[in-house]
Image (cartoon, rainbow, N blue to C red):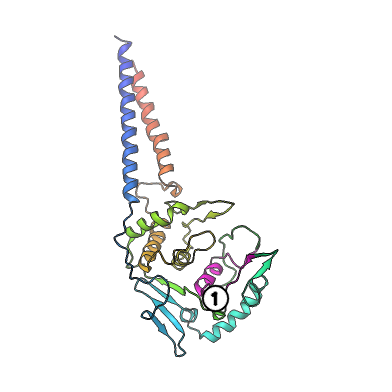
Amino acid sequence: MNATFPSLRRSIAAMFVLCLGTFSIFTSSAHAEDEVGVTSSNVNTKSNIGQPSATNTTRDANGNIVQYGSDAITYQSPSKVTGKTAAELQAIGRALYMENCASCHGLKADGVLAKGNPEAYPSLLGLGPAVIDFWISSGRMPAADPTVIQAARKPSRLSRAQSLAISAWVSSLGDGYPYIPKVNSKDASLSSGLSLFALNCAACHTITGGGDALALGTYAPSLQNSAITATQIAVAIRSGPGNMPNFGSSLTDQQVADIVKYVKSDIQNPNNIGGAGLGGLGPVAEGFVALALGIGILALAAFWVGDRQ
């Protein structure tokens, strides 16, 4: 009887630990499913999708579009953003382009062949000022090494005003969109942004926005860097830089604004109400810690109780 009782206590303790662990995993899984549930009820097919139309544009005295968009996102020309005239901005931009960009993209921004590869130093014509500004303001261009597989984000060599000037000059050579987006995050939906991010972005950037490796030495960059601006996020969604898909026609302005709000708030400034953020690695790291520490400690405590005489 004396030998049987401790064994019985150990068995009961082990069953308790097993049940507790199963319940914890079930609860975590259910919570994760609630967080990433996706709905399409907020899709408004009548919203603008980053292109000007006859009813959403503002033109200058010469008939040039200086602003267009919707209540969610307003797209502005570089001259509208900087307050300089188009001619003044283009003159500054041309000089800066010749100094920093022409050796790779050509004197007319129409690209330069490299060993027969037409995409080695691509044409910039028709890309739109926001795309040019994105690559320069994120520090990816001018590239220190044009031969790398994927240009990495780094501090920009040029100021924002210089970036906008170059984008204004390049855009003057051939019309292109989008213009520089100004996102109205105040009226955006955080819950909708989470759902849209999970559906469209998490497969590459991961659900926590930490980024991940892709094929052939490429990668989806981390979005947890607070230096990534709302404008840059919106431009990336609209233009699809590098290996990123182009969501120019599949997401409305309101949906883009919702995603931007979610990235700028929950991803870049997470509220770790449970305690330590664990590097923002998500349920895998959290589950590992719960199993290794929580369940492990409970198991040791159960065996200690069971082994006492």
Which quadrant of the structure image shows residue 294?
top left
- Tell me which residue sits at (51%, 74%) in the image: 128
- Tell me which residue sits at (67%, 68%) in the image: 113
**What residue type is disc 1 on?**
Ser
- Tell me which residue sits at (59%, 52%) in the image: 217
Compare residues 252 and 276 and report the one nearer the observer. Answer: 252
Compare residues 135 and 59 and report the one nearer the observer. Answer: 59
Which quadrant of the structure image shows residue 248?
bottom left
Quadrant location, the C terminus:
top left
Compare residues 297 and 186 and report the one nearer the observer. Answer: 186
Q: x, y percentage for residue 4?
A: 31, 12
In this view, the residue farthest toward the right is 115
Compare residues 168 and 278 and report the one nearer the observer. Answer: 168
Q: Which residue is mark 1?
A: 167
Q: x, y percentage for residue 19?
A: 31, 30
Q: x, y percentage for residue 223?
A: 47, 57
Quadrant location, the N terminus:
top left
Which quadrant of the structure image shows residue 102?
bottom right
In magenta, the rendered stretch is 118-144
Crowding at label 1, few (<14), some or many (≥20) Cα neighbours within 10 Å?
many
- Tell me which residue sits at (37%, 22%) in the image: 304
| Residue 131 is one of the magenta-drawn residues | yes
Label 1: element kind: helix
Compared to 21, does 4 lie above or below?
Answer: above
